[in-house]
Image (cartoon, rainbow, N blue to C red):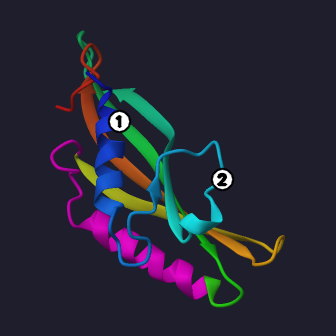
Amino acid sequence: MAHARQGIRDNIVTTLTGLAATGSRVFRNRVYPIAQDKLPGLLIYTESEEIEPSTMTPPRTQMRRLIVVVEAYVKAVSNYDETLDTISEQVEEALAVDVTRNGLAKDTRITSFESEFSGEGDQPVAVGRISVEVVYVTLENAVNQSV
């Protein structure tokens, strides 16, 4: 069985697939760049996770704070700020529909948004980086399921 964080990440991918601005162009891979014909699109990956024990007796209950990054990629000659804002709005609203990630988490919240722009190539590429904090709980000897 997979780690609970994979289930949460899978839920986020499913939740964000089919948005009006990005459609099915949702990817889990952050090693290779998204091809131009797949833009605008979303890239979803785990950035970090903090784990704190919340009980003393083994098996300890662990409070986990997972940071999932949703990167929105846009290639255009104008209005890329507006397009990033539209995508961000759709992502934030979609994630807010079920903050428990279908029962896998205690809470989900957006913690930051950053953007960057590159003028290289024939059209500028804009990237909006949305950090999503997901709080969930596991037992230290059963990290494949949330409690």
Quickly name the residue at label 1: 6
Q: Which residue is drawn at 20% across and 51% down?
A: 100
Q: How many marks?
A: 2
Crowding around mark 2 (Cα neighbors within 10 Å: few <14, some 14 to 19, many 20+) is few
**In screen coordinates, is 30 left or right of 24?**
right
User: Foreground residue, 71 or 92?
Assistant: 71
Reply above or below: 111 against 93: above
Q: Percent position (x, y) of residue 91?
A: 39, 69
The quadrant in which the N terminus is found is: top left
Q: Percent position (x, y) of residue 43?
A: 51, 55
Quickly name the residue at label 2: 33
User: Foreground residue, 105 or 52?
Assistant: 105
Q: Which of marks 1 and 2 is in front?
A: 2
Magenta-highlighted residues? 81-105
Q: Residue at x 63, y 42 (%)?
A: 31
Q: Can residue 128 be seen in this view?
A: no
Q: Under tag 1, what secondary structure?
A: helix
**In screen coordinates, is 140 left or right of 71?**
left
- Decide whether the magenta segment is chiefly helix, strand or loop: helix
Q: Percent position (x, y) of residue 72?
A: 54, 66
Q: Which residue lies furthest to the front in this view?
A: 37
Q: What residue type is labelled 1?
A: Gln
Q: Which residue is drawn at 56% across and 69% down?
A: 39
Q: What residue type is labelled 2?
A: Pro
**In screen coordinates, is 147 left or right of 7?**
left
User: Foreground residue, 63 or 19?
Assistant: 19
Q: Which residue is drawn at 22% across and 47% down?
A: 106
**In screen coordinates, is 70 left or right of 142?**
right
106 in magenta: no
